[in-house]
Image: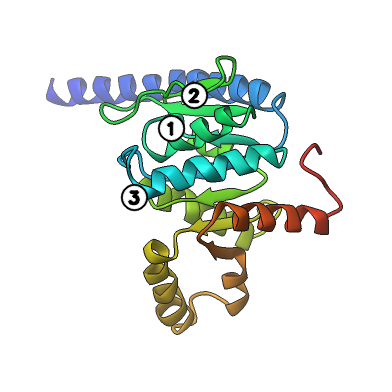
Amino acid sequence: MRKERHHKGWNEIKTNDSWALFKIMGEFVNGFEKMSAIGPCVSIFGSARTKEHHEYYQLAVDTAAKIAEAGYGVITGGGPGIMEAGNRGAHKAGGTSVGLNIDLPFEQHDNPYIDSDKSLDFDYFFVRKVMFVKYSQGFVVMPGGFGTLDELFEAITLIQTKKIESFPIILVGTEYWQGLLEWIKTTMLGNGTISASDLDLLHLVDSAEEVVDILDGFYRGHNLSPNF
């Protein structure tokens, strides 16, 4: 009897996994349909815990506004903190403001600066991450935690392995990111686990103007403008 119950439970798990595929497919289809109609965007990442009075919050607002003024839309994770600041800056500048929300038991709730027709909800992190990569012409990485690092290193890995076309990855905040970059240079490069050319995938800046200069410079070099 014990073995039979165990066997039945395992079959139920397998059945649930199979049905989950339909929900996953639905999230992909909905995301592809909505995101493909939006146009060129830049994703802004950063901590959900950053408060409105913090200097990084205001820097994210300014950066998003400059990006929008340059003709790009802005995509964020749709939540509070730096995500809210990114949508707020795009909204302030009259640009496209997209939010890719994730259902979490804490922290996450959509912010009020997302365009009403450009707010998408996801249950699966991996589906959401595909949308960021597939529909972004650049990653702007503000100070953040594990989730921010996850997005950063996935983008670097995909570009490094040529699974996707290269696009600008811009770290904003020298004080915050310098230690990580030094570790990458001294430990990873020093041990031969990455190549020196891999370091060229990252830009480190401290101002909104520098972010836009890098984005514009990259796409001018590819004979493209923000309305491509």
Q: Give the residue at x 67% y 51%.
A: 164
Q: Residue at x 57, y 51 (%)?
A: 208
Mark 2: which amino acid?
Tyr
**Going by the image, does 217 lie left or right of 205?**
right
Where is residue 72 shown, x and y percent of the image?
Answer: 69, 38
Q: Would residue 34 be seen by someone viewing this image from the given angle? A: yes
Q: Is residue 15 above or below residue 75?
A: above
Between the residue at mark 1 and the residue at mark 3, the CA separation in whole angstroms equals 16 Å
Secondary structure under tag 1 reads: helix
Amino acid type of the residue tagged 1 in the rendering? Glu
Where does the image place residue 192, in percent across and percent down from the top left?
Answer: 49, 82
Which residue is the site of mark 3?
145
Circles 1 and 3, Cβ within 8 Å, touching? The answer is no
Q: CA distance from mark 2 to mark 1?
A: 7 Å
First in residue order: circle 1 vs circle 3: 1
Contact between labelled residues 2 and 3, with CB atoms less than 8 Å apart: no
Comparing 26 with 8, the one in front is 26
Residue that carries the numbered disc 1 in the rendered image: 84
Q: To which residue does mark 2 refer?
A: 113
Q: Is residue 201 above or below residue 120?
A: below
Badge 1: few (under 14), some or many (20 or more) residues near its Cα, within 10 Å? many
- Determine which of the numbered discs, if any, sits on residue 53 in the image: none
Pointers 2 and 1 in contact (C-beta within 8 Å):
yes
The residue lying furthest to the right in this view is 223
**Lateral position of residue 98 relative to residue 185, left or right:** right
Residue plotted at (56% across, 57% down): 170
Mark 3 or 2, nearer chain start: 2
